[in-house]
C-alpha cells in the first residue's frame, strides 16, 4: 500500500529580508585580528600539528580539512580561505550546513537564524533565496559534477555581492576540491519544494568518491577535522578503509599520517 507523503507545494516560503540573522559579514574575523590565548598544553599540541602540516606540504603530501558549519558561524571563513590561498590545505570536506551558511553569507552578507523562534512560527529554514542552492545542485547533477564544484561554480559566476567571504568560491577559483557530504533531511534546503533528492544524492555521492580518492594519497599527509562530530569521522573512516583496501592489493601502505581533531 502506498504511504502518504508531505506535499511541499503547500509550504509558504518567506524572503530572507524578513529573517533575523545571528551572523553577518561584520562578525567574520579578519586575519590581522587578535588571536585567543591558549594554555601551554594546547599551544604545544597545536604547534605539533602546525609542524606536521608544514612538513606534509613541503613534501607534496595532502592536507585535508574536514569541517562542520560552526567554523563559518564563528567567523572563521577568512582563515580557511587564507589556508587555501597559501596552499596549506589541499582539500576541504564539508557538510550540507556549511554550504547553506557559506551561500547565504555570499548572497546577503548574513546567515544563521534563531531556530527556537522560527520553528515555533513554522518558518524555520523556509526562506526563498536559500532554495537557490537546490537549483545549483540540480545543475551540477545534470553536468555530472559534484556538489562542491557545482556550488563553487554558482558562487563564482552568479550575482553574489559578498563572495569574497565564500570558502566555496575561493576553492573553485583556486581549483582546490571541495566535497560536500550530506545526510537527507539534515539541512533546511531539503524541505524546499525545489529540492531534487536524486540530484542531492548524485552530487554528494560523486563528492564522496572524490574524497575517497584524495585519501588514497594520505601517506605522509594530514587530516584536520574541525567542528564535525558526525560527518567527519563517519565519512573519513569509510574512505580510509576503501583507500587501504586498494593500497593493500598494490603492496602499498597508508599508515603514517596525522589526524587532528578540533572539537568540543
Image: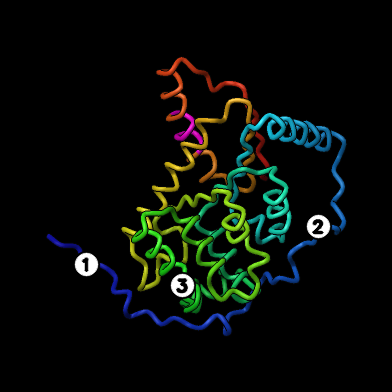
Question: Gap in Å between the C-alphas at discs 3 and 1?
Answer: 27 Å
Residue 28 horizontal side relative to residue 221, left or right: right
The numbered mark at residue 4 is 1
Instruction: Return the disc, 3 or 1, that comes first in the chain's sequence.
Output: 1
Residue situated in front as seen by the camera: 136 or 110: 136
Question: Gap in Å between the C-alphas at discs 2 and 1?
Answer: 52 Å
Residue at the image position 73 percent from the left and 64 percent from the top = 28
Asked whether 239 falls inside the magenta stretch, the response is yes
Residue 157 horizontal side relative to residue 57, left or right: left
Instruction: Return the disc, 2 or 1, that comes first in the chain's sequence.
Output: 1
User: Could you tell me which secondary element the residue under label 2 belongs to?
Assistant: loop
- Per the image, the residue denoted by label 2 is 31
The residue stretch that appears in magenta: 236-241
Mark 3 crowdedness (10 Å alpha carbons): few <14, some 14-19, many ≥20: some
For the C terminus, the quadrant is top right
56, above or below 70, in the image: above
The numbered mark at residue 132 is 3
Measured from the top left, where is residue 89 in percent x and y?
Answer: 66, 44
91, above or below 27, in the image: above
Amino acid at each position: 500500500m502506498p504511504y502518504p507523503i508531505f506535499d511541499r507545494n503547500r509550504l509558504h516560503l518567506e524572503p530572507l529580508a524578513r529573517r533575523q540573522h545571528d551572523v553577518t559579514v561584520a562578525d567574520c574575523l579578519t586575519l590581522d585580528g587578535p588571536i585567543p590565548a591558549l594554555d601551554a598544553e594546547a599551544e604545544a599540541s597545536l604547534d605539533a600539528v602546525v609542524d606536521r602540516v608544514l612538513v606534509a606540504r613541503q613534501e607534496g603530501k595532502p592536507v585535508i580539512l574536514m569541517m562542520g558549519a560552526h567554523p563559518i558561524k564563528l567567523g572563521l571563513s577568512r582563515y580557511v580561505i587564507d589556508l587555501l590561498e597559501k596552499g596549506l590545505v589541499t582539500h576541504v570536506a564539508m557538510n550540507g550546513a556549511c554550504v547553506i551558511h557559506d551561500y547565504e553569507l555570499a548572497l546577503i552578507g548574513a546567515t544563521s537564524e534563531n531556530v527556537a523562534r522560527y520553528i515555533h512560527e513554522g518558518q524555520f529554514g523556509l526562506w526563498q533565496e536559500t532554495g537557490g542552492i537546490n537549483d545549483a545542485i540540480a545543475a551540477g547533477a545534470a553536468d555530472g559534477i559534484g556538489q562542491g564544484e557545482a556550488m563553487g561554480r554558482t558562487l563564482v559566476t552568479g550575482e553574489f555581492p559578498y563572495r569574497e567571504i565564500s570558502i566555496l568560491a575561493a576553492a573553485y577559483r583556486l581549483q582546490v576540491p571541495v566535497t560536500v557530504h550530506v545526510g537527507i533531511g539534515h539541512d533546511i534546503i531539503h524541505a524546499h519544494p525545489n529540492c531534487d533528492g536524486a540530484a542531492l544524492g548524485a552530487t554528494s555521492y560523486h563528492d564522496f568518491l572524490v574524497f575517497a580518492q584524495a585519501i588514497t594519497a594520505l601517506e605522509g599527509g594530514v587530516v584536520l577535522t574541525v567542528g564535525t562530530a558526525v560527518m567527519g569521522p563517519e565519512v573519513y573512516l569509510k574512505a580510509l578503509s576503501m583507500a587501504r583496501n586498494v593500497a593493500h592489493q598494490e603492496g602499498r601502505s597508508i599508515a603514517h599520517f596525522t589526524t587532528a581533531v578540533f572539537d568540543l
